[in-house]
Structure formats: C-alpha cells, structure tokens
Image: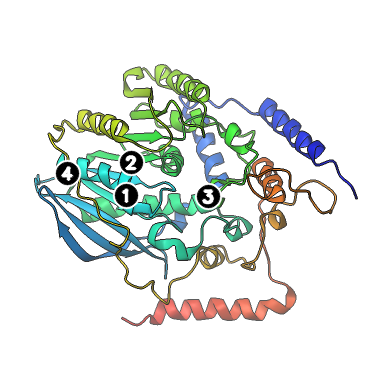
Amino acid sequence: MDIDIHNIFSTYEKRFDRAREARKIYRPWIEEEKSEIIQLVKKSLGFKNQLVPEIKSEVFKTEQRKDYDIQFLKFTSWENVFGAALLYMPKRRKQKNPFVLICCGHGAYGKLNPGYQALAGILAQMGIITLMPDNIGQGERVHMGHKEAVVPLSCGLTIQGLIVMETMAWLAWAKNELPIDFGKMAAVGNSGGGTLTSFLSVLCPELPVLSSSGHPGSLEFIARKEKQHCACNIVPGYAGKFEMWQLYGCFSPKHLFLFQGRNDHLFPEDLFYSNARKTSMVYEAMNAPHMLRTEIMPGYHPWDNERRQKLACFLAEQFDLPLPEQPEDDCLTSDDTCFTHWPREAITVNELSRRLSGCTAPDDLRLWDIFPPDIPECEIRQITPRGDTRWILAQYEAFLSDKKYFHRPHRGQWFVVLLQCVSFSWFRVFKPT
C-alpha cells in the first residue's frame, strides 16, 4: 500500500497538539498536586522504590594529585550489574566535607571525559568530595547496552528510570560511606546529565542543592523532534501529562541553578527562557525567588571553562567555600579505567530488566514492536537523515501512550522462564564468596 508518509507525521503533530490541550496544569507549590506530579513521573519512568539497589564498592587503585586523591571504584548495584566510578577526595579534610555528584551525559568515555574531569578537579580543590559514576551502558559500561536497548520498555521499565534508581542508590551510599555534610550535598549535570538531574529534582527531596544544564526547556519539544532519540530519552506517556518546569518546580524552595549556552543548537534559547519563567513562578509562589538562578551564557552545548567556573562559583556560594586560585589541569586519559577486563558474569541492561520485572522479551526486540505506530502494516519510506523513520514514529507512539507493554512467555517458554528464576534464586542464596 502506498502511504503518504508526510500525512503520517501530520497525524502525529495533531495528536501532540491534542495532548497539550488536554494537559492538566499541576501546580507544584500545592502539596496535593505536587504529589500527583511525582506519581506521574514515577509511572512514566517505571520507577519503584523497592527496585532501588544497594551500591557495594571497592577501591581498585588511587592516584594522587597535589590537592586531592582520585580513587578508582569498582561497584555492583543490582546482582551482577557491574560499574565503575571516580571518587575525588580532597586532602584538605574537615570532619564532614561538602559532597557533589556529577551526573555524566553522553560525552565520550563517560566519567573520563575531560570536561567532567576538569569540573571534578576544581570541586575537589575547593574541598568538595566529588563522585562521578558511569551511567548504565556508558563509559566502561558500554557492554551493558544503552543507545538502542528497548527491552526495558517492554518490561514496564525505562533506561532513564534505571539510571535514576541507581543514582539514588549512589546518594544513599555516599551518606553511609563518606564523611559528608548532609546539609551540603548537590547533584549537577549537563545534557544527559541535565536530563538525569531534572528527574532527581522530583525524586530526591533530600538533596539541598541541584544544577541542571544543557537540557532545561520543554519535554514536548524533545518528544516531537524528528530524530531518533537515544533509548534513555524515551520516557513513555509524558506527553500531555507533565512539563519540565513542573519537574524543576518540585525542587522548590531549595537552591536550583539552571543554565545553558546561547548557541546550543539542541535546545532553543526561547524555550529555556520560557521554562525559567514558569519555574520562577513556582519559586515565587513558595516565597523563595532568591533560591532560583537561571542564566544563558555564551557557548554551545557542552560545558566549557566559563560554565564550569560559573557552576563552581554557585557551589562555592552554597557551601561557603573559596574558589581555587589555579585549578590543576592533570586529567586522566581514556585508558585510565577501573576494569582491565569486563567481568564475565556481568549482565546486560536487557537481562537486568527481565530479572527486575519477571517479564521476558527477546534481545532483538525493536521499538516499533513495543509501541507500533498507528499506521497500516507497510514498508515505511525513510525520509529523514536523522535516524530510522519507523523508530521515530514509534517514539511518538511511546511518548503519547498510556499503556505499559509486558512481554509474557509463550506456552512453550514457561519451563525455560521457571528454570531461569530458580537458577537466579539459587545463585542469590548460594553465591560463592
């Protein structure tokens, strides 16, 4: 059947318009409505408190710098889910130091990206204990799968939700394992890290300080992009349910710094200002306008020296710390990894999702198998250079969908699934030490 693909895109544009018209305007400064936002966010992410793991870590090695040490951490979160992180420990120690979690984005090499390291070094010189973990499927954890891993979506989960849950486990780990001041904790992130911090603003009320950049704008704008998103950006059902300013509004009245580059081609300047205005409305309603800071700076999408300095100044102000006179410039390289070999027993994000949900789905599942576009079965013509057209249409369906897809075993598969569950339970009980 010859289908006009342009008409299909037009149909989805109208569906997004209708979703926006029907969206309820939740007011985060009213406790009952804030609770509704939190529940909607949890539903879209597939977030469940009982699924938040426990971080177990060990120091692989330590490198010394003039003002701080860098500890290379190996860790596990869920069973057989391995990861790597860098912990910057200042040599100027107090009984309890401030703490900052740097949430990495899609920068090359994850935590070993020079831009992230440069900020970590500045903060450590200021006396801040700084943690940088690799997110699921990024940095040293690429073997887990990330960019096109859609099996989590088939299990009622999301990549972003799993990252949020693991990040919350890191914050609990920091409170238990590090000599930190609970009143001087912050999470900061740019781009994908900005996405993560936007969800932390809703789900981590224990954080007193937060900064999000390279992302604040409009969730609807992101959902309607005619490009193939990374799987971590696909959060089902949020179109027509909540917007970005409501996420940041849930953080009020605590210290929040939103910023981005003027020439950031991924997120238009006008949308940043619109989001900032609406977020400021929440802070004003809670009599805390001085706790919100928003700024457009010269530059493009990634952090540059000016933005790192602005962020360091913001944190110095909140934590009552001096800025370093001459930041060290001695970064690790992409070869400075925590693992010499990826553990043979490590599982992928697909296997993790099957274990957490009890659902089953093949590794070769495609996004359009989970969220089939509302069109007749046909061969879809590729009309955009920015990814697979069928994937893009399936994204639209995901963002607009209220359903949760669960891949259940066929009759002949039940014995295999039962055997997998018994084997996993046996491993948990009789795991060798």
Along the horizontal axis of the image, is 215 left or right of 256? right
- Viewer-side label of 1, 3: 3
Q: Which residue is mark 3?
A: 232
Q: Which residue is mark 1?
A: 171
Residue at the location (35% across, 29% down)? 256
Residue 328: image tag: 4
Element class at badge 4:
loop
- Viewer-side label of 1, 2: 2
Q: Which comes sooner in the sequence, label 1 or label 2?
A: 1
304 or 167: which is nearer to us? Answer: 304
Q: CA distance from mark 4 to mark 3?
A: 33 Å
Instruction: Judge whether 327 appears above or below 296 on screen.
Output: below
- Viewer-side label of 4, 3: 4
Q: Is residue 206 visible?
A: no
Three-letter amino acid code of the residue under disc 3: Cys
Count of labels in the image: 4
Do residues under tags 1 and 2 come within 8 Å of each other at their CB atoms?
A: yes
Q: Which comes sooner in the sequence, label 4 or label 2?
A: 2
Q: Which residue is mark 2?
A: 187
Q: Which comes sooner in the sequence, label 1 or label 4?
A: 1
Do residues under tags 1 and 3 come within 8 Å of each other at their CB atoms?
A: no
Q: CA distance from mark 1 to mark 2?
A: 9 Å
Do residues under tags 1 and 4 come within 8 Å of each other at their CB atoms?
A: no
Three-letter amino acid code of the residue under disc 2: Ala
Instruction: Judge whether 64 appears above or below 350 on screen.
Output: above
Q: Is residue 433 visible?
A: yes
Q: CA distance from mark 1 to mark 3?
A: 21 Å
What is the x, y in percent for residue 239? 63, 36
- Quarter where residue 25 is shown: top right
Mark 1, Cα crowd under 10 Å, few <14 / some 14-19 / many 20+, is many
